[in-house]
Image: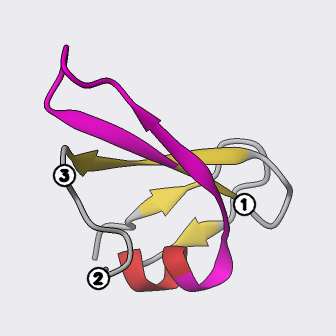
């Protein structure tokens, strides 16, 4: 099974998106609207490196 995300600094392997969300700390969202149709959700790895998750514009973080 392919990993969802691997931290390039410490090598922490997030096997699934759910594991990534549960074990990382939310930092914020960087929006690129209206120029692109996505935003980046920024989260901190256990080693404090900031990792990004691509979100479609209008994605509701409250419902995720």
Task: Indicate the secondary structure of the residue bearing disc 1.
Answer: loop
When the figure is inspected, residue 52 is found, relative to residue 61, above or below; the finding is: above
Mark pair 1, 3: CA separation: 25 Å
Task: Please name the residue that numbered disc 1 is placed on.
Answer: 45
The single residue placed furthest to the left in the displayed view is 37
User: Which residue: 19% across, 20% down?
Assistant: 34
Where residue 5 sits in the image (x, y, percent)?
A: 46, 59
Task: Please name the residue that numbered disc 3 is placed on.
Answer: 58
Whether residue 37 is in magenta: the answer is yes
Mark pair 3, 2: CA separation: 11 Å
The single residue placed furthest to the right in the displayed view is 47
Task: Please name the residue that numbered disc 2 is placed on.
Answer: 63
Q: Which stretch appears magenta?
A: 22-41
Where residue 13 sits in the image (x, y, percent)?
A: 58, 68
Where residue 52 sits in the image (x, y, percent)?
A: 50, 45
When the figure is inspected, residue 38 is found, relative to residue 45, above or below; the finding is: above
User: Which residue: 22% across, 36% down?
Assistant: 38
When the figure is inspected, residue 12 is found, relative to residue 48, above or below; the finding is: below
């Amino acid at each position: 099974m392919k990993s969802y995300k691997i931290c390039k600094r410490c090598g922490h392997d997030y096997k699934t998106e759910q594991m990534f969300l549960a074990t990382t700390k939310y930092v914020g969202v960087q929006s690129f609207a209206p120029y692109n149709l996505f935003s980046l959700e920024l989260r901190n790895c256990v080693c404090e490196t900031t990792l990004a998750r691509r979100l479609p514009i209008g994605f509701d973080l409250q419902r995720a």
